[in-house]
Amino acid sequence: MTTGAADTPGPPAAAGAADTAASPETPWPADDATPAARRTSRRALLGFGGAAVAGAALGAGVAAPVAWQASSNAATPIDIVEFFGRYQAGIATPAPARLAFATYDLTVDGTLAQRQAALKALLQAWSLAAAAMTAGHPVPGDLTDPEAPPADTGEAYGSSPANLTITVGFGPSLFDDRFGLAGRRPGALADLPRLPPEDLDPARSGGDLCVQACSDDPVAAFHVIRNFARLGRGTVVMRWSQLGFGKATSNGADQATPRNLMGFKDGTRNIDGADRASMNAHVWVGGETDQPWMRDGSYLVVRRIRMRIEAWDRDFLADQQNVIGRHKYSGAPLTGAAEFDTPDFAAKDGHGEPVIPMDAHIRLVAHENAGGIRILRRGYSFTDGMIADSGELDAGLFFMAYQKDPRSQFVALQRRLGSADALNEYIEHVGSGLFACPAGLRGPGDYWGSGLIG
Amino acid sequence: MHLTRWSRRVAGAAGLVAGLVAVAAAAACSSGSNGSPSAGTTQVTITLTNDGCAPSPASVPAGPVTFTVKNTTGDKVSEAELKRGGTILGEKENLTPGLSGTFSLKVEAGDYTIECEGATTDSFPLHVTGGTAQAAADPAVAAKLNAAVAGYQTYVLAQADKLGPATTAFTDAVRTGNIAAAQRLYAPARSYYERIEPVAESFGDLDPDIDARADDVEDPSAWTGFHRIEKALWQDKSLDGMTPVANQLDADVAKLVARVKTAKYQPAQLANGATELLNEVASSKITGEEDRYSHTDLSDFEANVDGAKQAFMLLGPALQTVDPQLYTTVTQRFADVEDALTAYRGDYAGSSYVDYSTVTEAQRRVLTQKVDALAEPLSQVAAKVAG
């Protein structure tokens, strides 16, 4: 540590502005940057002369705490994903290893003006905190007054944000009569219809607001939903939350495809977040929206999909592969030899049967069979231990998908799966949520939903 | 969540002395690497041995002080306490030989002692010189804070004065074996105690003696206080053997009342004590843990909130000057909690509330959320009124 005073936590209020001003990185262009370019990699920072320069880049010029550098260990990974930009980070940006997700319900009452003011104050406070946390700083406020609880809860202090992204969305219930937003509800935010087979738990579904925090450090991710709950005390209560302990789905061509808890590679044919044309065609909301405030945003569908792991694990290999439509170890389609081979859905075996069965999961969801529908999946494996009633594992896929319009994308795809998917024998949708995630924040001072409630 | 006897004690001390535990924990985390002391904080080192615990230096100026307690070789001692007039203001416990720890607080001028039970000499003087730590920059605010402290002293004395007779009425019924009467008198007697619980907790073992739950004590036969009798009344439905427990409760309450008469407070203590009372509500009352046999938890809940509100309202005039927005927020949140509680009014078992076992999990969750919504801004008050 060469910046001396930075060892002592200080008021980080100016950190956000200083970050931008002092950063040697090229600011993220409004239009053309790919997600890869948004990442301030460790190598890029060290390239400017090592950790000391990195400290200056991150706002230490004003003696703000560069907390995670306190170890003065140059080998410490320094990975930051730019928080500000045209789009919210956490969608196209490469999915890191861990997830902390939570939804919150607003509890404020009073007059309409008071409720609106409380919602705006909350989103401003969250935005300020998020800008700090994603840059590796504590939640703004006093950390050293012995008489006061520190403004930041502290568990991430001294750690790298490890590619932390924080993404916020608005649920359909926010657009009831409480905040005067009924007229601003996008058509695409229509309540999800019943999508059998499903057995949704209301205690794990819905919410006025959602927060998706992703990081390679699970503590950094949890730190977000904890501090957001604290900052919102009296305005919001947490409705439910879900931790994801492992990235289950790749969303970029340069990533190794991870496996979900069924042991199969997931995301092989997913949209690549760096593919601007596909993102514009399927994910980012454009001029087609009926609500201009959603331009450059995206709609998030989350499904807590419990896997019947015990049953799956005693299914024989050939059947597991027929259920999915892929080879378990290589990830290749049953008609191919390598993971990224294009599936041949017309191929027949010696008995005249389709090589990829008619009810195989990949056949039903493939865009060439589904009218060109594609979504950006960004799921995480979860477990919440054991189901007490049965002694079986409570684990599965926390499915998250971003898209332009859930009515014609997720809902249409899920309807195809619901009636026919062989996978249904082994999975169960037990939680659900739909959220309108607005555009990114333009810079310090901007806040989530400024176009909606500003 | 249940508090053990040990943590209850620490929590009590923390509640009264401005976030001791939090400060100690933060110090432990920085573990000597880069924890540069903030400007103006005096450092006192206490070397703990079997011979004693002399502070160095033994005289310090009023203001923020960080005490570093090091147990070098003492196998008969494991804690050091800062006391004034019999009240524990700060302490560090569980220091076996080789361990050290810190606690920090703001001290005003006067004579204190550093005590270490088990040592050959177990009490050493600490002299604090100069003005009072609470001398706020604005004399008008300082006058309001002085009035708050005086008002709180009066309030605590008034509650203690009622606690004595109410406890005796309860224990008289216990001694005469009148279960029905004792059940009716249990909740009302406790309410006076619950209003001033953080003060009681600052007197070391008195709170466990009066208010321990079954799982707070290692030796069940040593379990005393209200909850021992509560179990006899509602679960055992027999008062056999309870007369000595009733006598002991009278004696412990009398001790508490006597000590309260000389207790002195600082403005931050009022605020932290109020937060501590709400933490008690969330951890012990809403869970149904406190009055698990009688289900009179809502009566204790109300008393905790009353005590917290009293302390806050006394600080109100000063806080309105220092941070009017915070004053307004906390005032509104107190009203929200009181409104939520009103919905459960009743006349169960001598209390003014319903049987707590009839309150559903969903309802308990809402109560917790309201209490948390109040306690969060309330926890900001101490720093505003601490000189």
Image (cartoon, helix red, strand yellow):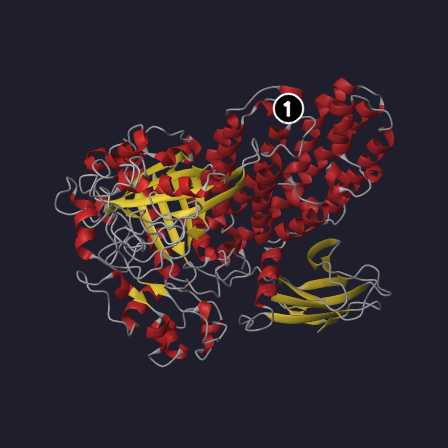
Q: Is residue B216 above or below residue A93?
A: above
Q: Is residue B209 above or below residue B125?
A: above
Residue A59 visible? The answer is no
Task: State the residue at coordinates (48%, 37%).
Answer: B369
| Amino acid residing under circle 1 | Ser
Residue A171: horizontal and vertical position, in percent? 31, 38
**A384 or B85: nearer the viewer:** A384
Q: Is residue A4 above or below residue A190?
A: below
SS under mark 1? loop
Task: State the residue at coordinates (48%, 63%).
Answer: A157
Which chain is disc 1 placed on?
A: B
* Figure quadrant of the N terminus of chain B: top right
Q: Is residue B97 above or below residue A230?
A: below
Q: Which residue is mark 1?
A: B351
Q: Is residue B158 rendered to the left or right of residue A205?
A: right
Residue A288 visible? The answer is yes
Q: Is residue B45 rendered to the left or right of residue A428?
A: right
Which quadrant of the structure image shows residue B233?
A: top right
Q: Is residue A17 rendered to the left or right of residue A136?
A: left
Q: Is residue B260 rendered to the left or right of residue B117?
A: left
Residue A116: horizontal and vertical position, in percent? 29, 40
